[in-house]
């Protein structure tokens, strides 16, 4: 019953009709009564104050409202088109009201010498004021209407303005929808939750969000509706996670066997940090369960994720399964291979590598050993996903730097076995907690929030182009102490050619300023073959060259402990998380390391914040929070993913506390009643079912 009226098409609302209905659908995606109710104001204006015309000053930059009468109207022809002008007067003076478009309706309906309340922004010209496109309302109606001192302002579009669907019109149809539906809003929350959190009931929340009775009630209405929105998101994510765990069986790795134990007891190259131990425990307990693991391992650059991943692999091997690790670039895959092979050799494990550049013969060999089960660990790039790559029994798939891989690719890995392997996704791009909570609510998250001991924090400095000589001096000093230096240039797909040119020019300049035989320089860029890249990288890794000039191909993973300086050219062209990633290439040895951000002189406000943030902190999570504030969730997670969230009122940046509360409550309810079978949870269940029918959340692996 509730649905039937709230689902009524919007054109059937009195005062809307087919024509306006179409516009509302196209411009605001309002299709039904319910959509209209869920169309929330952007902000609220104080309408308790009525100005007299002689009180107006040009300091008044926001809207003002005035009571008065129209005493004269005229249409003025201009070269650029017509405008319609009304002279508006109160007992203290006159101003002009001006319409440039959509004034046919105004012209026909305006009443002369009748009290109106007008509302809008002022223009100030030659000591007199005018108000373009005011909102107008007869004083007599103004007094009767459902309203308060707080006037909601709804989002608008150009088309709406043209069609004369003003804020006032929205307000009017909102009143209409209230009078037609009010008694039908049913409460969605169980009474105990309403009482416990002292939530405003649904009816009052809707009423106060659209017609705030006072600011206290408005705040409560906002809280309630934001909480509701986030709560259902969490409920959906969490219950999916639980369902997945119930339904999707994985391999229970219940044995901790010889590989793990002998590595842990005899071959650990260093003591694990507490954070590493904790995370390893989480992974072990996950994989020890029959449910398939789906875990995100977050840890800042250099936090030591690799060894954790390796030890998880050992567990798989101990239980008779194979493991694989997929990295986004060839360089990174190689580096992982070298590092992991070194560890694996100690306990006698066979490790292979498969990348795009593998020769046919090597490939065949890998395929065979993999299928027979002889090869226990396979490391590689996207090449792992090819159909020809068949495991005997893949038990654990690790994905490094997941931001580079799409969901589709992840699910390909997943299908490599009849029973899906456990999945561990490692990322060095810290995702702000709130985002992780709302987007990966169905993924379990482990965080390594502690760096291995003995690292000196990297010092970050920002220089304008004019200070380049000083920077070069500094590099020479460092090189004379035996250190190595990265100089990184931007590489952005759209302007690849230009970037290449910049890189080459930069390289020539550097070659001149750091001449042979005293200095030797490596260069790595996207136009080289993987082989050439590796050879150059190799020279730098071995310390044969002092300087590595590169585009951002070295961004992820590369490990050269002797490199102590990272120069980032045109740093203004990098996003915060990229800058942070690049910086993470240094500071891996015992020496003091530096990151130098080079920029032009003119910086946008955002860029200034980015540079200041980098200089101020090394904490990847703090940086991620700033990034989230600067760019919003859309840009960080990709439009598609955040668009799916489609939050109408809550804001992932501003409403973190509400999000936490919502998550906490959702967990509490699910713990108590996992399938939402209790009487009190029936409304929750219905809403949840509707949400999954619409498939609101897609972002999980299966
Ligand atoms: P990331 O998390 O960025 O992938 P790595 O796993 O590459 O970091 O580790 C960075 C460096 O720190 C490596 O040289 C690794 O051997 C070293 N490392 C990792 N854990 C520890 C530890 N507990 N103590 C000392 N060094 C460690
Ligand atoms: Mg790594």
Image (spheres, rainbow, N blue to C red):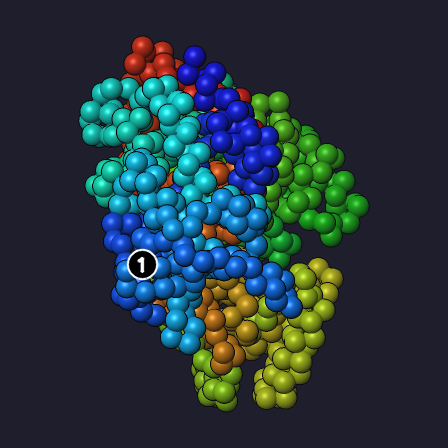
260 up-or-down from 495: above or below = above
The residue that mark 1 highlights is 90
126 up-or-down from 470: above or below = above
98 up-or-down from 356: above or below = below
Q: Position of residue 448 (x, y in %)?
A: 37, 48
Please name the residue shown 35% across and 23% down the image: 182
The quadrant of the picture occupied by the C terminus is top right
Which residue is at the front of the view, 210 or 336?
Answer: 210
Q: Image quadrant of residue 350?
A: top right
Q: Position of residue 385 (x, y in %)?
A: 67, 39
Q: Position of residue 53 (x, y in %)?
A: 31, 63
Q: Judge from the rendering whether residue 280 lies leftward or rightward of residue 321; answer left or right.
A: left
Please name the residue shown 60% across and 42% down the image: 406
The quadrant of the picture occupied by the N terminus is top left
Please say whether residue 681 is visible from this viewpoint: yes
Which residue is at the front of the view, 104 or 532?
Answer: 104
Q: Judge from the rendering whether residue 570 lies leftward or rightward of residue 290; answer left or right.
A: right
Please say whether residue 245 is visible from this viewpoint: no
Q: Residues within 10 Å of mark 1 (few under 14, many from 20)?
A: some
Please name the residue shown 55% across and 73% down the image: 570
Q: Judge from the rendering whether residue 252 lies leftward or rightward of residue 662; answer left or right.
A: right
Q: Image quadrant of residue 457?
A: bottom left
Q: Judge from the rendering whether residue 534 lies leftward or rightward of residue 191; answer left or right.
A: right
Mark 1 residue element: strand
Q: Position of residue 47 (x, y in %)?
A: 29, 50
Which residue is at the front of the view, 204 or 259?
Answer: 204
């Amino acid at each position: 019953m509730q649905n039937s009226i709230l689902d009524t098409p919007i054109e059937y609302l009195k005062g809307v009709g087919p024509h306006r209905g179409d516009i509302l659908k196209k411009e605001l995606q309002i299709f039904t009564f319910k959509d209209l109710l869920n169309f929330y104001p952007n902000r609220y204006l104080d309408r308790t104050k009525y100005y007299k015309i002689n009180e107006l000053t040009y300091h008044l930059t926001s809207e003002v409202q005035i009571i008065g009468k129209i005493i004269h109207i005229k249409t003025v022809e201009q070269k650029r088109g017509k405008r319609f002008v009304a002279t508006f007067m109160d007992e203290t003076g006159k101003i002009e009201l001006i319409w440039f478009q959509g004034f046919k309706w105004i012209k026909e309906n305006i009443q002369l010498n009748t009290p109106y309340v007008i509302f809008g922004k002022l223009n100030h010209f030659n000591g007199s004021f005018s108000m373009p496109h005011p909102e107008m309302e007869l004083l007599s109606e103004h007094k009767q209407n459902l309203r308060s001192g707080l006037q909601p302002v709804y989002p608008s579009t150009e088309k709406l303005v043209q069609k004369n669907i003003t804020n006032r019109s929205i307000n009017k149809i909102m009143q209409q929808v209230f009078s037609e539906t009010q008694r039908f809003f049913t409460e969605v929350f169980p009474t105990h939750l309403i009482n416990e959190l002292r939530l405003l009931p649904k009816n009052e929340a809707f009423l106060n969000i659209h017609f705030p009775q006072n600011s206290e009630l408005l705040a409560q209405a906002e809280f309630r509706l934001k909480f509701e929105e986030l709560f259902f998101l969490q409920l959906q994510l969490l219950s999916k996670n639980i369902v997945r765990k119930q339904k999707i069986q994985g391999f229970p790795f219940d044995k901790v066997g010889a590989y793990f134990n002998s590595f842990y007891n005899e071959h650990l190259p260093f003591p694990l940090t507490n954070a590493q131990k904790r995370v390893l425990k989480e992974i072990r307990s996950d994989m020890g369960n029959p449910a398939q693991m789906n875990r995100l391992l977050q840890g800042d650059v250099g936090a030591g994720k690799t060894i954790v991943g390796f030890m998880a692999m050992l567990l798989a091997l101990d239980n008779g399964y194979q493991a694989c690790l997929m990295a986004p670039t060839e360089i990174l895959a190689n580096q992982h291979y070298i590092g992991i092979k070194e560890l694996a050799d100690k306990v006698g494990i066979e490790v292979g590598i498969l990348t795009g550049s593998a020769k046919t013969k090597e490939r065949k060999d890998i395929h065979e050993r993999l299928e027979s089960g002889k090869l226990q660990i396979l490391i590689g790039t996207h090449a792992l996903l090819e159909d020809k790559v068949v495991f005997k029994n893949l038990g654990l798939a690790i994905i490094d730097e997941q931001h580079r891989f799409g969901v589709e690719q992840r699910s390909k890995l997943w299908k490599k076995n009849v029973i899906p392997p456990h999945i561990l996704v490692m990322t060095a791009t810290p995702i702000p907690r709130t985002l992780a909570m709302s987007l990966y609510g169905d993924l379990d998250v482990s965080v390594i929030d502690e760096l291995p001991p003995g690292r000196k924090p990297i010092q970050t400095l920002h220089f304008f182009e004019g200070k380049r000589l000083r920077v070069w001096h500094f590099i020479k000093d460092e090189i004379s102490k035996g250190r190595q230096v990265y100089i990184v240039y931007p590489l952005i797909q759209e302007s690849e050619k230009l970037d290449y040119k910049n890189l080459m020019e930069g390289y020539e300049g550097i070659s001149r300023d750091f001449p042979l035989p005293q200095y030797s320089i490596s260069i790595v860029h996207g136009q080289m073959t993987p082989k050439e890249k590796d050879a150059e990288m190799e020279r730098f890794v071995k310390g044969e060259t002092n300087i590595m000039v590169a585009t951002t191909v070295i961004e992820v993973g590369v490990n050269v402990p002797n490199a102590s300086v990272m120069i980032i050219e045109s740093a203004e062209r990098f996003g915060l998380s990229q800058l942070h990633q690049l910086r993470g290439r240094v500071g891996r040895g015992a020496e003091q390391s530096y990151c130098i951000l080079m920029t032009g002189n003119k910086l946008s406000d955002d860029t200034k914040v980015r540079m200041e943030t980098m200089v101020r902190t090394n904490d990847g999570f703090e940086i991620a929070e700033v990034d989230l504030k600067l760019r919003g969730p859309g840009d960080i997670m990709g439009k598609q993913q955040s668009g799916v969230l489609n939050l109408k009122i809550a804001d992932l940046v501003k409403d973190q506390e509400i999000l936490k509360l919502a998550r906490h409550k959702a967990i509490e309810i699910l713990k108590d009643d996992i399938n939402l079978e209790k009487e009190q949870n029936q409304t929750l269940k219905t809403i949840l079912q509707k949400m999954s029918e619409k498939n609101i959340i897609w972002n999980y692996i299966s």
